[in-house]
Image (cartoon, rainbow, N blue to C red):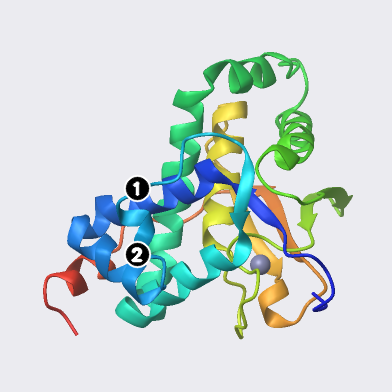
Amino acid sequence: MTVNQPEPKVANITLRMLLNTITRLMGRRGLRLILSRADRIYYLADMPPENFQLAVPCSTLTRIFNAIEAVGGKRAMRMFMAHAGKDYTEYLWQAIPHVFESMRDTIDRTLTPHGQLRYAVDLLAAAGGQFAEVKVVVEEIDNAIYFTLPYTLDSWGQNAETPICWSMRTSLETQLKRLTNDNIITVREMTCRACGNANCSFQISREESLPLYAERDPLISRSVGGG
Ligand SMILES: [Zn+2]
């Protein structure tokens, strides 16, 4: 992203959910520690409202992600982001059920499982603009579906050697499974803005994946005194 481009903004609800996930995993003291390191301690007393107004600069999220990594390390960061993506998706399904139910109801169940998946991906791509200022492109190459966007909340302003968009990946996977009732959907990030690629591109296919939450959560173990 060039320096002249205005900084994109994300919805208040996105930051609110992120802070809720930090609180759930690390407690109120953990939230204080992270916000303090991110130089955003004022959110402790004044949590962002649960609305979809695009009012939070992306750099606020970047500061918070960097604070989590500074406290817990890269592995903790990855686990945290996966939790955050899943929490956010589940919250949205409860907060605005009519939006997702009407999306789910438009999927033609006589289509093949792949056809239903493609339809669900197109629905999410069209809905994406509600949550952040991004435009999503959907393509199909050799029977795999690619969901591509110029950056994600995970990668904006970040540098990394391997793709890092864990919350986006988990969120996509969780939403697509819910929309299609198809539990073998797997999402992988193939290119990532944080790695110097032109965009973040997620390959979506129908195959069994390893459970994301099977590992012991290092963020929790660290917060109770681990190294
Ligand atoms: Zn990425």
As rendered, which of 38 and 111 lies closer to the eye? 38
Point out which mark residue 48 bears: none
| Percent coordinates x, y for residue 98 in the rendering | 58, 15
Give the quarter of the figure containing the C terminus: bottom left
Point out which mark residue 41 bears: 2
Classify 173 as above or below 201.
Answer: above
Classify 181 as above or below 205.
Answer: above
User: If the picture is divided into quarters, which one holds ligand 1?
Assistant: bottom right
Disc 1 residue type (three-letter): Asn
Badge nearest the viewer, 1 or 2:
2
Which of the two labelled residues, at mark 1 and mark 2, occupies the earlier sequence position? 1
| Percent coordinates x, y for residue 28 in the rendering | 20, 56
Q: Identify the image quadrant of residue 164.
A: bottom right
| Percent coordinates x, y for residue 147 in the rendering | 76, 51
Residue at image location 35% in from the left, 64% down from the top: 41
Give the quarter of the figure containing the N terminus: bottom right
- Tell me the distance, in whole angstroms, between the alpha carbons under discs 1 and 2: 15 Å
Point out which mark residue 20 bears: 1
